[in-house]
Amino acid sequence: MRYSTAILPIIVFLALLCGAPQAYPFPGNDQDRAVLTLLSQLESSYAGVEDYTAVLQKQERVDGELLPEETILLKFQKPLKVYMKWIKGPHQKREVLYVEGENDNKLIAHEGGIFGFVTVSLYPTSSTAMEGNRHPITEIGFGHLLDGLHKDIQTAVANDELEIIRFGEEQFKNRPGIVLEAKSVPRGERKYYASRMVLHVDKELMLPVDTAFYDDKGQLFERYVYTDVRLNVGLTSKDFSRDNSAYGF
């Protein structure tokens, strides 16, 4: 892993914070192990989450165009139950509900405005459901995000292709956090999801509450910010039912 000597003290501090270097079950040097241990801690934290609610700010580049930011109320329950309500942005009052294994594995949705009374069922990867989105609803949330980070970071470290730009303590939304900014520098034919990423971890939640991904031209193509995150709140089947009287399906 490549790194700037200016951030070595911060990296060493994080390595000590996460545990003794000789106890890390990872290959590589201390700096590699600090990053991989942080990733392992995030995965362990998420493993203890059964459900959560959050406000999600989402911005994506689709067909070359960076779309406006959307703000969404999100409810999630493992293994895969999702409710989303748009509260700001161009799709305000849109609602989407998906429960794996129900409704023929289709999502149900309705728009806001004058067509809000029309509810439709769609396969998550259908062209209509994917319009204006880089990912289907089945890839929403912390779990899919951590899976992607695990794959790319592990591969980059193993091949000495991760260049750290920033790694240390940094507040995010007035909460204590850790920031990791890094570039993927592939040699040969290897491909990574992003050329550069900026990751903010909430130190209390130990989850990635802000992730931004950039392409090889330096253009942002995805950013997801989670605020007001509440873990293990005890969501029930009513929270994922189209018959919930608080919903507009």
Image (cartoon, rainbow, N blue to C red):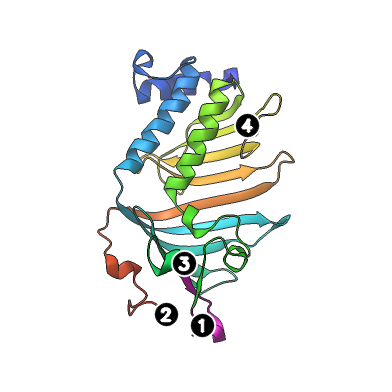
Work out how far the residue at label 3 is from the one at label 4, CA to CA, in angstroms: 37 Å
Q: Quadrant of residue 229?
A: bottom left
Q: Which residue is mark 1?
A: 116
Dot 2 or dot 3, earlier in sequence:
3
Helix, strand or loop under label 4: strand
Q: Is 117 placed above or below 8 here?
A: below
Work out how far the residue at label 2 is from the one at label 3, CA to CA, in angstroms: 17 Å
Helix, strand or loop under label 3: loop
Q: Which residue is mark 4?
A: 183
Q: Is 197 placed above or below 4 here?
A: below
Amino acid type at circle 2 is: Gly
Amino acid type at circle 4 is: Lys
Work out how far the residue at label 4 is from the one at label 2, CA to CA, in angstroms: 43 Å
Q: Furthest-front residue in view?
A: 104
Front-most of 11 and 92?
92
* Span shown in magenta: 106-119
Answer whether labels 1 and 2 touch (C-beta < 8 Å): yes
Q: Quadrant of residue 113?
A: bottom right
Q: Quadrant of residue 196?
A: top right
Answer whether labels 4 and 2 touch (C-beta < 8 Å): no
Q: Is 69 placed above or below 210 here?
A: below
Discs 4/2, front: 2
Q: Which residue is mark 3?
A: 106
Q: x, y percentage for residue 23?
A: 34, 16
Q: x, y percentage for residue 69?
A: 59, 61
Amino acid type at circle 1 is: Gly
Q: x, y percentage for residue 152?
A: 55, 33
